[in-house]
Structure formats: C-alpha cells, structure tokens
Image (cartoon, coloured by chain):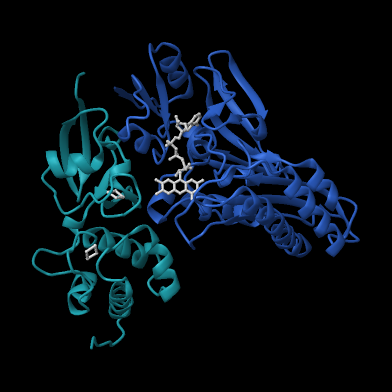
Chain colours: A cyan, B blue
Amino acid sequence: MAKVHVATTINGDAVEFLCEADETLLDVLRDELHLTGSKEGCGSGDCGACSVMLDGRLVCACLVLGAELGGRAVETIENMADGEVLHPLQRKFLEHAALQCGVCTPGILVAAKALLDKNPEPSETEVRYWLAGNLCRCTGYDKIVRAVLDAAGEMRGELTHAE
Amino acid sequence: MRYEAPETLDAAVALLAGADGETRLLAGGTDLLVQLRAEMIEPALVVDVKRIPELCAIAAEDGGFRIGAAVTGAELGEHAALKAAWPGVVEAAELIGSTQIQGRATLGGNLCNASPAADSVPALIAAGATASIAGPHGRRQAPVEEIVTGPGETSLAKGEIVVSFLLPARPPHSSDAYLRFIPRTEMDIAVVGVGISLTLDESGTCGAARVVLGAVAERVLLVPEAAEALIGTAVDEAALARLGEAASAACRPIDDKRGTKEYRIKVAAVLARRAAQIALERARRN
Ligand SMILES: Cc1cc2nc3c(=O)[nH]c(=O)nc-3n(C[C@H](O)[C@H](O)[C@H](O)COP(=O)(O)OP(=O)(O)OC[C@H]3O[C@@H](n4cnc5c(N)ncnc54)[C@H](O)[C@@H]3O)c2cc1C
Ligand code: FES
Ligand code: FES
C-alpha cells in the first residue's frame, strides 16, 4: 500500500513526512521525526503518556492517525522549554520531585500546560480531574498536583516557595 | 488500509459506495484506533469525516440545536447556549473519558460504536434527538433510539453516515439530566446510566417525560413505563418510587466485573430517582 504524504506543522515548523495509513501520530513523532519525548504507556488512550496538543486541543497521540495531520498543527513536549530555559511547570516538577521514572512526565506536563493556558487559577480538584487521564505508577500524584498548583501561582506572579 | 479525508458529504458517500471490502468512518478515533490496534477490525478503507463542515458545526435550528456528529465533547462543553438548553446531553457527553479523550470523542462515534454503556446515548434519546443520515440513496431522518440494535450493531445501511443530531426546541419549564454509576470517580465504563428529560406545566405538574437506561441491556433502552410514572404527577415521592420500580423492571442486564445483574437492577432505580430530581430542579428554574 502506498504511503500517505503529509504536510503539517509541528512545534511551529513546517514538516513533511510519509507514513502508513494506519500509523499513529505517536509512531510518526517517535519513529519518523525522532521526537521521542512523547511516550507510549498503553497505546489505547488510558495512560496519557503520549499527550500532545492538536490544533490547540489536548489529545492522546496514540489515538490519532499520522495521516490525519495534513494542514493541522501539533505541539509536543519538545516545544515546552524555551531553549535552555525550562517552563515554570518543568522547573516546579524538579523542585517538588514530582517525577521518579519519568515516563508519565512529558504527558503530564503537556496536559498541565493545557490546563493553565485555559484556567490560570485552578483548584486542586480541578487539577486532579483535568489530569485524570494521566496515569503515574510512581509518585502517588500528590507531588504532581502540588507542582502544578505552585507553577500556576508563580505564573500568576504570586510569590511562592517550595519546601 | 487506505485513508481518505473528503471535504464534502457527497464525496464521503461516494467513497464508501465505491469501496470493496470493509470500510469504517473515522471521527475522533477513540474507539476505532483502539479496535484497529487490537486487530479487532481490519478495514480496507478508513474515511475521516472531520473535514466535512456539516459534521463539525453546532447551529441553532427551529428553536433547538443541530449538532454535527463529529463535534467533540470538549466543544459541546464550551457551548454555553447548548449547555443551558440541554444540560443533560452536555453532561453526558462530557463524562466520556479523560480531558484527552474529550478533545476527540464525538456523539456520532459514541452512538455508532454501539456500546450498550455509551454515555451520551441515553441523554440523546431522552432529549428526543433525531439523527440526520446521509447515504447512497439520499437523506433520511431517524429517532436516535432506532440506530443501535445490539452490541456493535446498528441499523445503518452500508455506506450510511450519521451527519448530525437535531435537539428540538424546549418548552418553558423543561430540562434534562444524565447520571451514571461507576466504581471509580473518573475514567470508567457505566454500570448503569440514566438519562431523563421532562417538562412541567405552570402548576408544576409533569406534562411530558422521557426516561432512558444505559448499560442494563444489550442496547440503550427507552422506557415509556418509567416516563408514565412521572407524567401527570408533581414528581413527588410516590411518583419517584414508581419511577424506580419501572426502571428496575425494564432492566435485563448481564453480570460482569463491574456489577452483577441484581446490583444493576437496584442501582437503576436509585439513579433514575436521582436523575429525575436533578431534571426537576433544573426545569423549575427555567
Ligand atoms: C480511555 C478511554 C475512555 C473512554 N471512556 C468512555 C466513557 O466514559 N464513556 C463512553 O461512553 N465511552 C468512552 N470511551 C469510548 C469512546 O471514547 C466513545 O465511544 C467516543 O464517543 C467515540 O467517539 P469517536 O468520535 O472517538 O469515535 P470513532 O472511534 O471515530 O468511531 C467509533 C465508531 O463509530 C463509527 N462512526 C463514527 N462516526 C460516525 C458517523 N458520523 N456515522 C456513522 N458511523 C460513525 C466508526 O466507524 C466507528 O465504528 C472511552 C474510550 C477511551 C479510549
Ligand atoms: S500511550 Fe497513549 S494514552 Fe497511553
Ligand atoms: S514518574 Fe514513573 S510513572 Fe510517573
């Protein structure tokens, strides 16, 4: 079967690639474009490790076909830091030790950023519900939620300090 | 597998009609991609419907709303006027999966995947929604309750596409509600789901009602006996008790890891009463 030719935008750059019709966006990112920040935990939409933004919406890259991307815009974890300068969420995850093995972390950061872009002052409950599709086997979630709330505070310009 | 993303309904219908072998429509892909990966299905052609404008819009029509079959849960939740008129339909759609799933999952996919536990389907049926369907022989309209015939089975003919759903105009003092019971607080499949829509008259008597149960039979059930328990009453304790009995009596569930038959039958009564009370409170405020 002939491959599908796709012209799209990834992290602000025009990108063209060839993929199989049944290849997922996650496989395209990781295997064709070597953007390996997005992880595969389950491949079935349950874990959120593959979270990316597609035309401004948070989605699981494992449940999108690469062939769908023509003319669309994707943002991945690779676009979160500004060069060497980490995004406040990334910094707060380090400060709060909100990761252990790190497999869930890229997806959680992308999801958390999507929340803060929409709602700069979420409650703890809102953070927990928003991130319900991001599973973490290591941290028990508490440190993740603290890090997100702390980053939100800092981004609103409030003075905060991590313990 | 071939992938096509036509930009018109006619082109989509022609692609399906002209295809040899198994074809599938792709909306949000949250069921389809899982099934592709598990090799439960091996379609020769997948037709992505998300570039067809009619499937992707929410528009006011005849005092009600027309919702494209490929509109996502996230978009439904952001539509203030739709949410005000049909809070039960929107809350049901918003229960589907996580934030990530909401960014993709559609009403058309939820219906046509034909799971007996699909969350938005009881709410759409309670709302009296009509599906507009395009196919090789033109357009037809069908009540949503006529689409799904059993697990994974629909009454859609080969090459037919659900284009949109029409939610009718709301009389004053009308509202709806959807409740589901799951063992966790998020990310699970309904053990029982209940959608109820009702209209009160000026004196607060229930003049019209529709009661629909999910996950308690091989398909979603519209239960007229349960609606009759409410109609002509003030939706008082006695009416709610009869509603619960009628809901339980309509169930013909299976045992599975999420709940036994007995449990589902009992929970159906409890949820029906609670959903009716929520719809009642909302209708009084309208
Ligand atoms: C992690 C996860 C959690 C989930 N949680 C829930 C939940 O809580 N509740 C729930 O009800 N579901 C849940 N689902 C299932 C799924 O998300 C929903 O059924 C969703 O609404 C499907 O919509 P879709 O647009 O993604 O469908 P798709 O996967 O694109 O399509 C589903 C089926 O419908 C057909 N189809 C799609 N659109 C049309 C159309 N317009 N006309 C005719 N046929 C069409 C397709 O060919 C396919 O067979 C979950 C899924 C995942 C992966
Ligand atoms: S890998 Fe996509 S949700 Fe788990
Ligand atoms: S840090 Fe290991 S899964 Fe979250």
Left or right: B162 with respect to B213? left
Q: Is residue B231 left or right of residue A60?
A: right
Q: Quadrant of the C terminus of chain B?
A: bottom right
Choose between B251 and A6: the one closer to the eye: B251
- Residue in the picture at 32% in, 30% down: B39
Give the residue at x 31% y 85%: A158
Tell me: B244 left or right of A154. right
Q: Position of residue B179 (x, y in %)?
A: 62, 56
In the image, residue A96 sits, relative to residue B242, either above or below, namely below
Viewer-nearest residue: B267 or A88: B267
- Res B212 quadrant in image: top right
B15 up-or-down from B121: above or below: above
Residue at x-position 49% and y-position 34%: B113
- The percent coordinates of residue A68 (x first, y second) are 30, 35
Residue A99 vs B156, above or below: the answer is: below
Q: Residue furthest left?
A: A84
- The percent position of residue A123, horizontal first and vertical second, equals 43, 75
Q: How many marks?
A: 0
- Point out residue A77 in the picture as x, y percentages from the top left corner: 20, 57
Q: Residue at x 28, y 80 (%)?
A: A154
Q: Quadrant of the N terminus of chain B?
A: top left
